[in-house]
Amino acid sequence: MSWQLPSLTALRTFEAAARHLSFTRAAQELNLTQSAVSRQIRQTEEYLGLMLFQRVKKRLVLTEAGQSYVEDIRASLEQMQTATVNLLAHKGKGGIIRLATPPAFCTRWLIPRLAEFSTRFPNIFVDLSTRAKPFDFQSEPFDAAIYYGANDWPGAVVTEKLVGEELLVVCSQSYYQANRENLLSIDHFGRHVLLQQTSRQTCWPEWMQSRGVHGVNGLAGPRFEHLYMVLQAAVAGLGLGLLPRILIEDEVATGRLVAPFPGTFTSEDAYCLVFPEAKKNESRLELFRSWIHEEARRQTVRDVRDAGAGAAQQA
């Protein structure tokens, strides 16, 4: 393959200068002289036939071409850095799975189970980062992501449902005591504060439709970006939360949250594993996929058992 690229040194120098918007600070970071950085940038511009920087009122700014170029090469440089660290750390055996995950799922469900994964696959490490919204796998160096939603991740990805489609209406003990009369009948549902998640605005209307609740605005109520924030708002007594059952098991078991209405609601949304089609046959990801689906099946079996026990108690 014939590579038409500036040298790696030139690319690193350009990225540092673009990040600092200063040749002097880039030189300090790279342990070069300011004139060496200036020379590298000039040679790169000559090679590309484009201006990457310009001076505006004695300030260094990126041109439109420079801004576009640095965004593209920065992701590639980060991937090369990660690949090199991975290789040096594991000597070609095992490696790292870079996984993006919502904060609540990460802390409540995934991390407590990762010890078992580490025991089974001691040479594979899971590098966790939190993300609340879908992103472009091409622009961020992740192998896979956990996502709460349906099959609606943008771009060409594989989506595999895991857990979390069972939702439960919950509130704090203080909210329950203050609103007990209005919680005795579904007919008084319009008197409650509904805690909303910003990206899942159809959950309450779908729940109300399943319960035959009419004439209530299911979109009204304070909004929160993350499900974990909705959970904390419910614990604080701000209103009713509609949350995945797997996130609130501890709070319900300890009485910090109560479920005023019997039964759960099955949503089309769930926690899903998503990854690029090109990653499908990578050995590390295959092992992780197999393991996390096994854990999801265990969760489902436990949920079914708990639901049966609850029904028996009510009977």
Image (tube, helix red, strand yellow):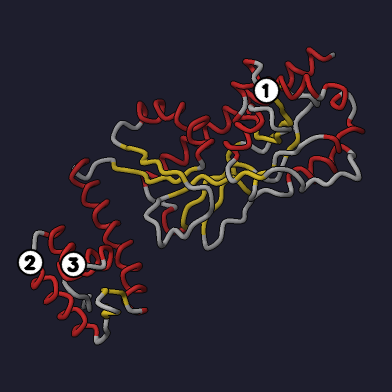
Residue labelled with disc 3: 13
Q: Is residue 111 above or below residue 97?
A: above
Q: Is the residue marked by circle 3 packed among few (<14), some (14-19), or many (20+) residues within 10 Å? A: many
Q: Is the residue marked by circle 2 packed among few (<14), some (14-19), or many (20+) residues within 10 Å? A: some
Depth check: 252 or 237 in front? 237
Q: Quadrant of residue 216?
A: top right
Q: Position of residue 196 (x, y in %)?
A: 69, 43
> Measuring 63% from the left and 37% from the top, which residue is drawn there?
230
Q: Is the residue marked by circle 1 packed among few (<14), some (14-19), or many (20+) residues within 10 Å? A: many
Element assignment for label 3: helix
Say what amino acid the circle numbered 1 marks: Leu
Q: Is residue 119 above or below residue 94?
A: above
* 126 on left or right of 27: right
Say what amino acid the circle numbered 3 marks: Thr
Q: In front: mark 1 or mark 2?
A: 2
Quarter of the image for the C terminus: give it: top right
Residue labelled with disc 2: 33
* 167 on left or right of 97: right
> Measuring 69% from the left and 43% from the top, which residue is drawn there?
222
Q: CA distance from mark 1 to mark 2?
A: 61 Å
> Measuring 47% from the left and 41% from the top, which residue is drawn there?
289
Q: Are dots 1 and 2 in contact, CB under 8 Å? A: no
Element assignment for label 1: strand
Residue labelled with disc 1: 257
* 109 on left or right of 310: left
Depth check: 51 or 247 in front? 51
Check residue 187 in the rendering and tell me which mark sits there, or answer none: none
Say what amino acid the circle numbered 2 marks: Thr
Q: Position of residue 126 (x, y in %)?
A: 37, 39
